[in-house]
Image: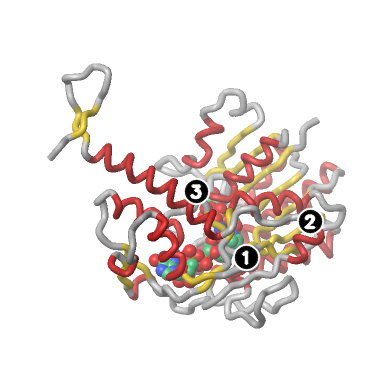
Amino acid sequence: MSKVAFITGISGQDGSYLADLLLSKGYSVHGIIRRSSSFNTARLEHHIQNPEVYNKTFFLHYGDLSDYNSIYNIFEKTNPDEVYNLGAQSHVKVSFDMPVYTGQIDGIGTLHMLEATKEHQYRLGKQIRYYQASSSEMYGKVQEVPQTENTKFYPRSPYGCAKVYGHHLTINYRESYDLHASCGILFNHESPRRGETFVTRKITRAIGRIYQGLQKNLVLGNMDALRDWGYAGDYVEAMWLMLQQDTPDDYVVATGNMISVREFCEKAFSYAGLKNYEQYVVTDERYFRPAEVDQLLGNPEKAKRQLGWKPKVDIDGLVRMMVDHDMELARKEFMIKHMTPTKQHNHSKYEIHHS
Ligand code: NAP
Ligand code: F7E
């Protein structure tokens, strides 16, 4: 019998990579999607369009972390062996604009997931293993460098505060109800599937568009912030490994290296062949945060030692992967923009408009 996984946040960056990984391991994968007036499943299209997989081993259910009833019902329908709670309002800057909503989803939403796990473990009489997406944002104004599982938290945003609540709740449910519940304290991780308003993707999208003449400038906020950036594809393996351990625990997942937003720009622009990134980048107060996290640097020794996990992609590999992807995306955008519908060629809907 294949194992059954239930993923919240399956339509996001990490959820989509985790679904790829679990399907490749033979799992049946169930995920929550939110009702939206426009499509929100772009990162899952390769599974939705695959008749071998869709509604056979890969299933989507409408639900929302704010709605306990929907969560409870999905548990009841799917009887999961493993639960990955990745759903969140995950944007730090947005959490200052929507603090209550962020608390409801990232905090109380986590409580909904833990309650449902506890209830269904009891109902089914089998262990359900639970993964909580904790975050390096919990360290905020860092109390030591690098940060380990024992470093004190000092969150600097409503997002960071909500994640601290979810983190402690997960530990509390583990200790109170004997749940196999683990927290991954993941440092920033990126990919070509990263949301376009997070800084690395915003930079690589802009590079492709500037290269194609589709955009002139890149407007950023604090370029001095330092982050420990890894590759999302590597990080979902660590999530899975945590749930394969006999004993649940909490782990820092990071590369152990950090660079600034400015250095990321330098690397990415120069890899694209655009020398002098300064001529394209402007800063604007709009993108600064009321309270900033100046630096984050993780120590992944415990994950290396206990899980046998280590990152395969370094910062230069990550920059190359994201720039290559977004150069190609912008090339396609350019083609579409400069093509006009034509009646002359039946075989092709478009032709290049040389103006
Ligand atoms: P993401 O791309 O922003 O994806 C977030 C996911 O959560 C999306 O599927 C989103 O659905 C879903 N979601 C949002 N609100 C929801 C709600 N009310 N009910 C149900 N689902 C909801 O985030 P990510 O980068 O993949 O991150 C995954 C998790 O790891 C998050 O919990 C994040 O906070 C945490 N984390 C991320 C990082 C990182 O660097 N990426 C680091 C540490 C921790 P829609 O597609 O419909 O919006
Ligand atoms: O910002 C600075 C910004 O939004 C990184 C989430 O996945 O990782 C992520 O949170 C840094 C910050 O990520 C812009 O001020 C400058 O210092 O890409 P970001 P984040 O805030 O670190 C953690 C671990 C999570 O858990 C979160 O879910 O870059 N920055 N200029 C900018 N940031 C953005 N977004 N946009 C700018 O224009």
Apparent side of residue 115 relative to residue 93 in the rendered image (left or right): right
Amino acid identity at mark 1:
Ser
Q: At which x and y percent is residue 295?
A: 55, 76
Closer to us: mark 3 or mark 1?
3
Q: CA distance from mark 3 to mark 2?
A: 25 Å
Q: Residues within 10 Å of mark 1 (few under 14, many from 20)?
A: many
Ligand 1 within 8 Å of disc 3? The answer is yes
Q: Residues within 10 Å of mark 3 (few under 14, many from 20)?
A: some
Front in this rendered view, residue 163 or 184: 184
Q: Secondary structure at mark 3?
A: loop
Q: CA distance from mark 3 to mark 1?
A: 19 Å
Apparent side of residue 264 relative to residue 58 in the rendered image (left or right): left
Q: In the image, what residue occupies the spot 57% across and 23% down?
A: 51
Closer to us: mark 1 or mark 2?
2
Q: Secondary structure at mark 1?
A: strand
Ligand 2 within 8 Å of disc 1? The answer is yes
Q: Residues within 10 Å of mark 2 (few under 14, many from 20)?
A: some
Q: Earlier in the sequence, mark 3 or mark 2?
A: 3
Please give the residue where the numbered disc 3 appears in the rendered image: 193
Q: Which mark is residue 135?
A: 1
Q: Which mark is residue 307?
A: 2
Rendered view: 80 above or below 204 = above
Amino acid identity at mark 2:
Leu
